[in-house]
Image (tube, grey):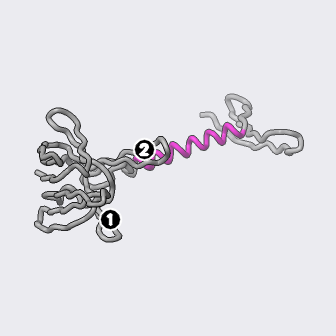
Amino acid sequence: MAEASMVRSAQSPDKGAVGSVTLTSMNEGNQVIPAPLLRRGRTFELLIAFVSCVLLAGGTASADSDSGRSFTALITDAEGVVTELTNVSFYWEEQVSEAAFVPHELKQVPVSRGAGTVKVRFATIKEIEVKPAPDSSLPLVTITLTNGKTGAFRLAIAGSFKGESDFGEMHIPANSVRRILFK
């Protein structure tokens, strides 16, 4: 196996020399690699390490415990049309720059309660009733849990309910929904 050692050249900046590193290998002799290339390589290594850590940590857009579970619901829209959707999720896009968006698919509904935000998991919800807000802001929702408890909230994020219908993928904007009944 070849051994390698790195030695930084000690040239003074007034001679116009650019810093470089000498890589010495027992089999190949000496090879000079410019320092900017090493910095680029190091940056790439750090980027790969960061991405690997995020992926290994499970850092996805959907970070809730029910992310692998599929939910089925009957959704009634503002026109009274009832549609059965499978693999239901709450979908919204986060704008990170003028032309870039990050999509989020959640198995929970983010709602406001006072100054806080509550993420109500689909697994605990029996029914959601949606009422349009009088001032065209985010809609008001009444959530009934599977244990019978109810609560009134305001939707925290403008989004849509997304799922698979018999005819294909469907998005229903949350402000156009009137009722969601989870099966």
SS at badge 2 = strand
Q: Residue furthest right?
A: 14
Q: Which residue is mark 1?
A: 117
Q: Which quarter of the figure has residue 126? A: bottom left
Relative placement, left or right, of 42 versus 168 is: right
Query: Contact, CB < 8 Å: mark 2 with mark 1?
Result: no
Relative placement, left or right, of 160 versus 28 is: left
Residue 6: horizontal and vertical position, in percent?
70, 42
Residue 3: horizontal and vertical position, in percent?
64, 37
User: From which residue to which does the magenta span run?
Assistant: 35-55
The residue that appears at 57% across and 41% down in the rendered structure is: 44
Q: Residue furthest front?
A: 135
Q: Which quarter of the figure has residue 42? A: top right
Nearer the observer, 134 or 180: 134
How many other residues sit within 10 Å of disc 2, few (<14), some (14-19) or many (≥20)?
few
Nearer the observer, 4 or 91: 91
